[in-house]
């Protein structure tokens, strides 16, 4: 079932890429084309920063909580069952969420290359 989720993420990103390429195809040789190319690059930058910060915060939270539980266990304050269950849940979320972030990052990279190519063609290809 997890692979279906990854496949769905890839399919949605393919659709986004198709829409972006269709827009670039419609804007070929128009004055707005350069503005749309730069807006595409800004969009990619914002999304990449958001993905990176989301991953970093989640990763930091998970490992910091893990270390705090380890310190508590060394102080003879064992974690409760709820805390152990929460750690298992967070570990599962991190394990299953990271490939989705990688898929999204790859497609954002392809989108940025498409925007750069479109800008190159529009600015210096004439």
Image (cartoon, rainbow, N blue to C red):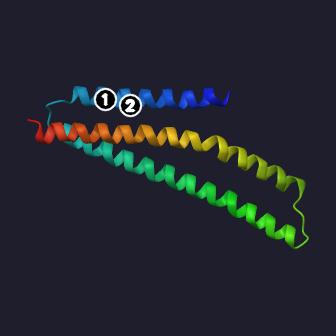
Check the image and report above or below for 71 versus 43: below
Q: How many marks?
A: 2
Q: Which part of the image, by quadrant, shows the C terminus? A: top left
Residue 28: name its quadrant: top left
Which class describes the residues within 10 Å of circle 2: few (<14), some (14-19), or many (20+)?
some
In this view, the residue farthest toward the left is 126
Residue 123, which numbered label?
Answer: none
Q: Residue at x 48, y 39 (%)?
A: 104
Q: Which part of the image, by quadrant, shows the N terminus? A: top right
Q: What is the x, y in percent for residue 38?
A: 26, 45
Residue 24: name its quadrant: top left
Q: Provide the secondary structure element on which disc 2 rests.
A: helix
Disc 1 target residue: 21
Check the image and report above or below for 80 versus 115: below
Q: What is the x, y in percent for residue 21?
A: 31, 29
In the picture, measured across the screen, residue 67 lies left or right of residue 77, that is left
Whether residue 32 appears in this view of the structure is no
Q: Provide the secondary structure element on which disc 1 rests.
A: helix
Disc 2 target residue: 17
Q: What is the x, y in percent for residue 34?
A: 19, 41
Which class describes the residues within 10 Å of circle 1: few (<14), some (14-19), or many (20+)?
some
Residue 57: name its quadrant: bottom right
Q: Residue at x 23, y 37 (%)?
A: 118
Disc 2 versus disc 1: distance between alpha carbons? 6 Å
In the picture, measured across the screen, residue 87 lies left or right of residue 1, that is right
| Disc 2 and disc 1 in contact, CB within 8 angstroms | yes
In the picture, measured across the screen, residue 43 lies left or right of residue 11, that is left
Whether residue 125 appears in this view of the structure is yes
In this view, the residue farthest toward the bottom is 75
Q: Residue at x 66, y 47 (%)?
A: 94
């Amino acid at each position: 079932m997890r692979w279906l989720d990854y496949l769905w993420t890839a399919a949605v990103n393919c659709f986004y890429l198709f829409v972006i390429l269709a827009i670039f195809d419609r804007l070929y040789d128009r004055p707005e084309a350069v503005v749309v190319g730069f807006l595409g690059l800004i969009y990619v930058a914002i999304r990449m920063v958001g993905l990176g910060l989301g991953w970093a915060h989640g990763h930091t939270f998970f490992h910091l909580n893990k270390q705090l539980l380890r310190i508590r266990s060394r102080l003879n304050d064992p974690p409760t069952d709820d805390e152990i269950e929460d750690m298992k849940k967070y570990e599962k979320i991190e394990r299953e969420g990271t490939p989705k972030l990688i898929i999204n990052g790859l497609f954002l990279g392809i989108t940025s290359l498409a925007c750069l190519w479109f800008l190159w063609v529009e600015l210096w290809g004439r």
